[in-house]
Each structure stands twice: as C-alpha cells, then as structure tokens.
Image (cartoon, rainbow, N blue to C red):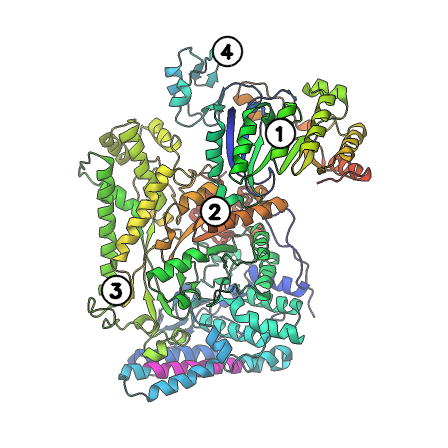
C-alpha cells in the first residue's frame, strides 16, 4: 500500500488520540480535493519552494536536468522527472520529498503501536487518504490492529471497493462516510462519482457496521448549499440504522500550496468558503427536516 | 457597592470563552489586581528604614532580625480592599527582590527565603499558639547553646510581631467588615474551626511570610481545606458558591505583586513560587480529591490567574472528573495547570531515601521540584551539559586539538567530564555548607548563616533542633545539581554519530573546525545536519537512547553522594529559562545550531526539532528512567488551540495525561497558545495585560517578559524561529 503520511496525535479524526494513516490514490477527482497529494496512485515528488535555500545540490545530481536554479528562483520541471530520488536524498532542508511510500500492513502497525500508551479505550488508528478502502491490505491492517486491541476508524469517500468497505465497517468502532452532493449530475460533474453506487455502498456499510458512523457533508458556497442536496442527505440519513448524525464540513482553501508543490494547478478559491450565515442556515434546515447535526 | 463595577471579559485561547460563575464584584476585583493596581501600590513603599533603631549596628543578627520583623508588623501599610473576603496583605514591594523589605542606611539587611513550601497544616489545624507552647517547652531543656536560645526566643518574638500585625488588621476590619472580622479574629493563633477560619488562617500566615519578604509555596491546599469545607457543607454553614467566592478572593489577593505594564520587564512578574498542588493520595493511599479541588479549578477556569501555578497529582485512583476538569482549564491557555505523575514521583522519593509516608505528602519548592513540605530546606545547582560537551570534551572554545577515533570514545570522554562537573558541584556544596564535611551524616554540622525565623516557625524540626532553616534546622537539606541542555547534548552526540561515523557526510575533524567557525560558509551542511535527522522529541529510539544514557549516568554520578551526608544530593533536570543566559556561551552545536540560538528548555526538545507532535515528545522524554531524577524532570508541551477544541479536545488532553502516566513521566506542563496572539501582544502590550504563559515552573504575564524571554516563548510555541515584523 502506498502511504503518504502517518500522522500521530490526531485529535479530530475520531474519538481520543489517534494515528491517522493517509493512503495514496483515489477513484474520485473532486475539484475541491483538500488532500491533492493523495490523489494519484503512484509516488510523487513534491517541492516546497518556501523551504528551498537554492543551494543547487539537486541541480547537480539530477540526471535529466529537471531542476533549474537561478536568481529568480528554483524551477522544478516535472515533465522529464523519472523519480529517481537523487534530489530528494541530497536536499538539506526537506524542500524536496517523496510523497508516497510503499508499506506493508505490518510496517504500518509498528508505527501505529508507537502511541499505544495514549490510545486508551477510545483512541487508535484512523485510515484516511485518498481513499483507503481501495486497498485490500487495509483489511489486513485493520485485523492486525484489532488483534492488538487498538480501536479502528476510517474516513471514506463512499467510493471505495464495496467488499473492502463492507469488511472494514465490520472491523471498525467508528467511521465517517462522505456525502458530497445529492444532485447526481452535479456530483458526477464535480467529482466523477456515481451516486447510486455510493448510496449502495453506504447502505452496505450500515448493515455491516460493528459500531456507529457519521455522514460528512462538505459545504461549498454556490455549489451544493441548497435544499435539494440537504433533502437528499436527510433522506439518506433517515434510511440508516447506525448513523449517529451528519457532520458539516465547510470548504477551506488552504490546500493551494499543496497543489503547487506537486505540480498541479492551484484550484483553491476563497469564493467557495461558506459564510457563517450559510453555515447556520444549512444546519438549521437540516435540523428542521429531522437530521441530527453533529 | 458605592462605586460602579464594570462587567469584565477575560481572555482565553479557547473559542468558547471562559465561564462566568463568580459575582461581578469579584470579577472586577480580579481585573484590578491583574492590571497591577496593588502591585504598583506596593512599590510606593518598597521597604521600611531601620535607621531610627538605636544601636542597630551593634545588635546580634537575631536581635537585628527581630527588630526588622517587629518594625514591619508595627508600621507596614495595611491594605483592606472593598471586595476582599480574606484579610492581610504583602504590602511592601521590596519583597519581590527576595529581601526582607527593610533597609539600614540604604542597604538591604537580610535576604529572604524562597524555593520552599512550608507547613501550613500545623498553624491552620492547631494554631500558631501551638508553636508558642512548643518553643517555651523546648527552652526548658538544658542542651541549648546561647545562640540556640537566642534562636528560640527569636521565634517567640516573631509570633509577637505577628500578633501586632493581626491586631492592626482586626482594628481595621472590625467595623467595616464585621463578617470577615468574625472569622479572622481568632486565627491563625487558635486552631481553625470551620472553612472560613481555615482559609483566613492559611491566607494570613502566607501574607505574613510575604510581608516579611519570603515566597513560600502553598502546597496541598485541597487536602488542608477539604475536610473543613466538607463539614461546613454538611451543616449547611456555607454553600459551594460562597466557598468559591472565598477561594477566588484568596487567588485574587495572591496577585498583589502584579505590576502594571509600565513597570519594566524581565523574566516575568508572576514567579513568586506560590505554587499549589491539587489531588493525589494521602498516607493511606486514598485519593483526596474533594470539593476544594474542583472549586479551585472553577476559579482558574474563570479568572486568568497564573500567579498560583497549579500542579495536579494524578494517580491510578484519580477520578475521571478530575482529568476532564483539568483539561477544561488547560484549553484556555496560560499554562496554569500542570501534571505530576504520582507513581513515578513516589517511587523516586522512596528509592532515594525518603520515608514512604513522608513521600506521600510531597508538594514542591514553589516551582515543580519535589520536596516534603515543611521539612525541607531546598535549593538547586544548575549546570549546562551542552557546554561541557562542546567546551570540555570537544574543546571548541580553545585551540587545543582532540583525538577521538570512535563515537564511543567521544561519549565516554563526555561522561568523564560530566562526572567531573557533578563532583565539583557536590564538593563545593559540602565544603561550603558544612563545617566538617565527611564526618558522616549524623555528625556533620551546618555552618551558621543568617536568621530566617519567620520561615523557621513554619518548618518542622526547627524548634526541636533549635536551629534555623539554613543551618540544618529542617529535617532535610536537599540541594541537587540540575542538568540543563540534556536534549541539545543528546542531539549533538547523535549528529556526530550520524554525520561522522555512520553516514560519513563529513569527517569528525572537519566538523569540529566548522563548529569552531560557527558554520560559516557551510550552510548546506548545517541545514543537512539540522533537517535530515530525527532528534530528541520525535520518538526516535536511536537518539532517545543517548538522552536516556545521559540522564541515567548523570543521576548515577549524583548517587555517589545521595543521602550519605547531612546535605542530600539527588539529581534533577531543569533549565528554568537559563537557555537564555547560556545562549552566547555555547559554541555552534553539531545538530545545526549556531552560537546565540535559544536551545532546549528543561527536559523538552530543542525548539524546532520536534516534528511528530506531543505524543512523540512525551515518548522521547519517557525513554529515560525518570524515577532516577529525584527532584524532577520537567517537560513543556505546547498545544495549538485548534488541536484541543471541542469535546474531542478534552478527550485528547485527558488521553495525553493518561499516556504520560502510563509511560512513567514525572512532570508535564501543557500550554495552549496561539503564536499570532503572542505576536500581537508584543506589538500592543496594553491590550494584552492579563495574557499569561507558562515559562517554566512559573507563569508570567507575557507583557512583563523582556524581548529575549518573549522571543523564547514565541519560538517554543511556534516550534522554531519566527520572523517578527
């Protein structure tokens, strides 16, 4: 499995103190993706110009002259990059780094066990990404954690592999599933997702769930803050057995730098951030139609 | 109330703000106190002059001391404020200079005492008159030298002076505050009979000690006052709301030395070692957490008072509610509540040589170094292990060449230098304080120093031994060497190991040359050293093994002395902000620091090198066997407001504390601070007068710190240097 990051002391990815494991690769292509470095299914090289001191070490070791350093700055031309990693290994500041490392479930478990003293009964591991539930090995990882007595949790787009999703739900104490938009055409256009498959997946996970879960609704101003979406979410929520409520996640525009670092265009836009009024109205409306907002 | 009382809002790092439970008057009183009204007032009369005392120069030291204390009690300004519910005050501002606030012909006469927690249980539970009887009885024995007789009489004189002060206050409150008069008139001389009397008794003793210049810690206030409150609640004599107001008054009055923003800056103004310890077990092993514990947490949750830094003794029996309430206070920022792990501390103390029941009473010296309150003369001796490595072992400040062939040779040479430093400190202490060092623990005698009778009264065994605090009167005299720069030293050794002996990035000889030149022209290598390795604070077993070895070997060197002498020499880990004094004395270090950088505080990571979050920092810190650091090892943890927001945040702080306990931690202070707020406060101090930050064992109002201290706090919270515009 390709892992981009193992983040210890995560305090908002499920109950207690958790270690969040970010998997690389996602079947969707949401234009607002907050973790763009996790989109592609292969290792990338990221370049953070803020950390670069223009020492030129990378330029000297690159076999394909991808790095150009001048007075004006450091240009990293990804086109000819063969990801040999020479530059990453010599960079003194970490401005150049690999995004994505192949890891076995055992290797991940070892890292997760580092914080066992802090998990107690509540805390543990959270699989996230990217889409964690496209990796068969995710199941083995969850089983390993279960056998170590570590509570498991995941965050899914709902577009994971149905069988993996179902099994994962049966191995976890809690999880989050995105419900990005109830308008099927808009959803497809903005993310590439097929709403019927997502809903079928959610229902399957609901049935298999060992614990409970929450729906996560991202709110983008001018995109999906409308009654059509909320009514749809309400309908789904009411049809579920183990769902404790809907968490509203306002869009943020902080991922722009992450796009640039991996050579993608910066698609973030402050115009999409819902204002306080929109947030309040959305929450009130959802509550008025009987949805538990958490 | 005659005057208009404004509504006040107190700052918090938590977006939900602070709760409101106290009366408008009490909240306003707090605001006035934190803005420096009483501190500025105290500075108007910083000390009293003894010039008018006839023949003062020819008096014996004890006669001089007694005259000084009497003068203070007879003539010091009184302060009774409209809203206060406890009576008495430290009105002589010169006390903040750690002096008895009197002068003779323009000079201070006696230094005062700090870094201790006296015994407040005896005066509150039995009354100061109990001491009087005990002293009189002791005077009847025929084993006393003339100086010892003079000492015991000085204690009686001290009580007399205290009675004079008390009389003046009672005169002042009798008519104006008849309620207060009722519970203040008999204490502290007689035993307290109810909660109000007990609190007043405690405050009056504390205020008396501060008025005479001393800075005692308070110790286990809930253990002392809890039983009184419990009885009164049962009888219906007091309500929880009333008790909270009274305790708030105690806390607000404790800020009486806080100065206004124009008072000048330094290492912070809220560091008079008035620490409070909450929770913990009693001698039978039962957890004593009670209503007073929670009421005090209520008070500091509502009022941003950092002047009584609180440490909670957590143990396996601590109630779940205590964790939650602690977390709820911690998330407001200010670093008011810190954590002791009782299990590690009790094991450390008993293994070192304290009796089990005495160890269970532990509080601190008013900072966080653990001691038996009312039974310990305490001080400590700080030194910098990084300078030992860089200057003594690697000779970076001289032209001398060193010839080491392996990493182990370097490490062992360093340990030899470290042992030499400990020997030097220990022998210096033994020779300096004892008349006959080496005569054996029972026979060794302390040298005569100067009178400290006000303190001696509240220290157990001083009456029995007929000797003062500084002269071996207390049951224990404990002066540990404290190692500083431990993380920086471990990082330096680890960097040498990696750069020169494993990864062969640079030769050892060349690295030494580069360090002597402060990395000049070697920026690539400096950044490489700094960024390519995971240093102490990242849960990297390789470097943590080095730091653990440093701390272990250090405590082993102290064990040579241990409890063998009348002066006990355990080990401890601290810097208390000395990383500032040391910054220009330290050459560039192998892990990429330059001369002049502010490096690690206490047992915390080097700023900017901990990248894995709080849990990894705690793991690195706990890699050492902390039961060997008898007086303590302090870890500072910074948390960002968003990390601890919401219910998740409360659960996380709770889990962090429990993990700290599981892993064998000793002492941890958690501060929640937003770097942007600190930067804003730097620019506009007047708007941030009450913003409190944890400095080390103490809190300080941020605006009362000078530029260097502010920089250190900001860099610590930001995890590295910050561009200040």
Q: Is residue A32 at all visible to an observer of this figure?
A: no
User: Looking at this view, is A118 or B81 the one in front?
Assistant: A118
Q: Using residue A262 as the reference point, say whether residue B375 is left or right of it.
A: left
Residue beneath the point at 57% across and 58% down: B319
Badge 4: residue crowd in 10 Å (few <14, some 14–19, many ≥20) = few
Residue tagged 3: B564
Residue beneath the point at 57% across and 49% down: B331
User: Looking at this view, is A126 or B377 the one in front?
Assistant: A126
Residue tagged 4: A79
How far apart are the alpha carbons under marks 4 and 3?
72 Å
| Image location of residue B622, percent across then percent down | 41, 47
Q: Is residue B166 magenta?
A: yes
Q: Chain of mark 4?
A: A
User: Residues at badges 3 and 1 in contact (C-beta under 8 Å)?
Assistant: no
How far apart are the alpha carbons under marks 1 and 4?
40 Å
Q: Secondary structure under badge 4?
A: helix
User: Residues at badges 2 and 4 in contact (C-beta under 8 Å)?
Assistant: no
Give, as a single range, the part of the protein colored magenta.
B151-168
Q: Secondary structure under badge 2?
A: strand
Q: Chain of mark 3?
A: B
Q: Using residue B115 as the reference point, say whether residue B181 is left or right of it.
A: right
| Image location of residue B292, percent across then percent down | 58, 66
Q: Using residue B131 as the reference point, say whether residue B149 is left or right of it.
A: left
| Image location of residue A151, percent across then percent down | 57, 39
Q: Secondary structure under badge 1?
A: helix
| Image location of residue B643, percent across then percent down | 57, 42
Q: Chain of mark 1?
A: A
Badge 2: residue crowd in 10 Å (few <14, some 14–19, many ≥20) = many
* Quadrant in the rendering for residue B272: bottom left
Residue beneath the point at 26% across and 36% down: B516
Residue tagged 2: B637
């Amino acid at each position: 499995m390709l892992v981009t990051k193992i983040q210890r002391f995560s305090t908002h990815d499920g109950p207690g103190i958790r270690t969040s494991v970010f998997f690389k690769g996602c079947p969707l292509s949401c234009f607002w993706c907050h973790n763009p470095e996790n989109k592609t299914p292969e290792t990338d090289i990221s370049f953070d110009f803020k950390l670069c001191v223009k020492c030129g070490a990378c330029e000297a070791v690159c076999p394909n002259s991808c790095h150009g350093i001048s007075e004006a700055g450091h240009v990293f031309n990804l086109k000819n990059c063969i990801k040999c990693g020479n530059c990453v290994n010599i960079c003194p500041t970490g401005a150049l780094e690999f995004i994505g490392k192949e890891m076995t479930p055992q290797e991940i478990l070892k890292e997760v066990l580092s914080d066992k003293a802090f998990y107690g009964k509540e805390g543990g591991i959270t699989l996230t990404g990217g889409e964690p539930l496209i990796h068969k090995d995710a199941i083995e990882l969850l089983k390993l954690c279960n056998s170590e007595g570590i509570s498991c949790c995941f965050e899914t787009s709902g577009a994971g592999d149905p069988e993996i999703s179902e099994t994962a739900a049966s191995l976890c104490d809690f999880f989050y599933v995105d419900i990005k938009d109830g308008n099927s055409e808009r959803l497809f256009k903005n993310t590439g997702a097929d709403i019927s498959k997502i809903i079928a997946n959610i229902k399957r996970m609901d049935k298999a769930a060992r614990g409970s879960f929450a729906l996560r609704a991202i709110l983008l101003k001018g995109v999906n803050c409308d009654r059509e979406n909320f009514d749809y979410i309400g309908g789904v929520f009411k049809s579920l057995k183990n769902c404790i409520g809907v968490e509203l996640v306002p869009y943020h525009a902080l991922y722009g730098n992450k796009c640039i670092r991996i050579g993608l265009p910066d698609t973030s836009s402050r115009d999409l951030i819902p204002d306080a009024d929109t947030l309040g109205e959305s929450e009130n409306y959802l509550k008025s139609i009987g949805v538990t907002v958490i | 109330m005659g005057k208009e009382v404004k509504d006040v809002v107190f700052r918090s790092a938590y977006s939900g703000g602070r709760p409101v439970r106290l009366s408008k008057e009490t909240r306003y009183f707090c605001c006035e106190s934190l803005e420096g009204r009483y501190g500025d007032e105290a500075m108007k009369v910083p000390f009293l002059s003894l010039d008018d005392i006839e023949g003062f120069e020819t008096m014996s030291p004890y006669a001089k001391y007694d005259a000084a204390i009497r003068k203070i009690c007879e003539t010091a300004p009184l302060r009774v404020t409209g809203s206060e519910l406890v009576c008495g005050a430290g009105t002589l501002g010169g006390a903040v200079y750690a002096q008895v606030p009197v002068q003779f012909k323009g000079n201070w006469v006696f230094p005062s005492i700090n870094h201790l927690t006296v015994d407040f249980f005896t005066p509150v539970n039995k009354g100061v008159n109990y001491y009087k009887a005990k002293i009189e009885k002791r005077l009847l024995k025929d084993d006393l030298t003339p100086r010892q007789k003079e000492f015991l009489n000085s204690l009686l004189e001290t009580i007399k002076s205290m009675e004079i002060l008390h009389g003046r206050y009672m005169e002042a409150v009798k008519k104006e505050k008849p309620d207060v008069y009722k519970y203040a008139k008999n204490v502290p001389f007689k035993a307290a009979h109810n909660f109000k009397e007990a609190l007043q008794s405690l405050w009056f003793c504390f205020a008396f000690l501060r008025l005479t210049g001393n800075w005692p810690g308070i110790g286990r206030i809930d253990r002392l006052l809890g039983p009184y409150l419990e009885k009164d609640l049962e009888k219906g004599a007091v309500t929880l709301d009333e008790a909270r107001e009274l305790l708030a008054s105690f806390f607000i009055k404790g800020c009486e030395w806080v100065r206004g923003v124009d008072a000048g800056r330094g290492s912070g103004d809220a560091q008079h070692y008035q620490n409070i310890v909450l929770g913990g077990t009693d001698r039978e092993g039962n957890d004593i957490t009670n209503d007073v514990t929670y009421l005090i947490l209520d008070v500091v949750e509502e009022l941003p008072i950092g002047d009584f830094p609180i440490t909670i003794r957590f143990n396996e029996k601590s109630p779940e509610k205590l964790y939650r309430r602690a977390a709820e206070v911690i998330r407001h920022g200010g670093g008011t509540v810190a954590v002791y792990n009782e299990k590690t501390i009790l094991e450390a103390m008993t293994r070192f040589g304290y009796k089990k029941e005495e160890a269970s009473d532990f509080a601190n010296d008013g900072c966080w170094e653990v001691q038996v309150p009312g039974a310990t003369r305490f001080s400590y001796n700080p030194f910098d292990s990084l300078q030992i490595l860089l200057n003594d072992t690697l000779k970076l400040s001289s032209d001398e060449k060193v010839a080491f062939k392996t990493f182990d040779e370097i490490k062992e040479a360093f340990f030899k230098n470290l042992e030499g430093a400990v020997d030097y400190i220990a022998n210096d202490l033994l020779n300096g304080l004892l008349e006959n060092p080496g005569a054996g623990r029972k026979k060794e005698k302390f040298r005569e120093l100067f009178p400290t009778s006000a303190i001696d009264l509240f220290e157990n065994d001083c009456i029995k031994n007929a000797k003062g605090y500084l002269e071996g009167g207390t049951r224990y005299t404990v002066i540990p060497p404290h190692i500083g720069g431990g993380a920086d030293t471990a990082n330096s050794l680890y960097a040498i190991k990696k750069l020169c002996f494993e990864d062969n990035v640079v030769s050892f000889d060349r690295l030494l040359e580069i360090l002597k030149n402060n990395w000049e022209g070697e920026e690539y290598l400096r950044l490489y050293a700094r960024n390519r390795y995971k240093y102490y604070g990242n849960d990297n077993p390789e470097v943590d093994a080095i730091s653990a070895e440093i701390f272990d070997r250090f405590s082993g060197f102290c064990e040579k002395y241990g409890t063998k002498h009348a002066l006990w020499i355990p080990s401890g880990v601290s810097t208390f902000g000395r990383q500032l004094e040391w910054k220009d004395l330290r050459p560039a270090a192998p892990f990429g620091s330059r001369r002049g950088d502010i490096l690690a505080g206490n047992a915390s990571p080097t700023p900017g090198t901990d990248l894995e979050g709080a849990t990894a920092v705690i793991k690195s810190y706990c890699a050492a066997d902390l039961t060997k650091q008898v007086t303590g090892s302090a870890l500072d943890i910074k948390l960002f407001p968003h990390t601890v927001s919401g219910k998740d945040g409360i659960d996380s702080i709770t889990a962090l504390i429990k993990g700290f306990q599981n892993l064998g931690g000793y002492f941890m202070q958690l501060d929640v601070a937003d770097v942007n707020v600190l930067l804003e406060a730097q620019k506009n101090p007047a708007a941030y007068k009450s913003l409190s930050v944890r400095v080390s064992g103490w809190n300080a109002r941020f605006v009362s710190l000078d530029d260097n201290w502010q920089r250190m706090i900001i860099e610590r919270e930001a995890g590295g240097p910050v561009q200040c515009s």
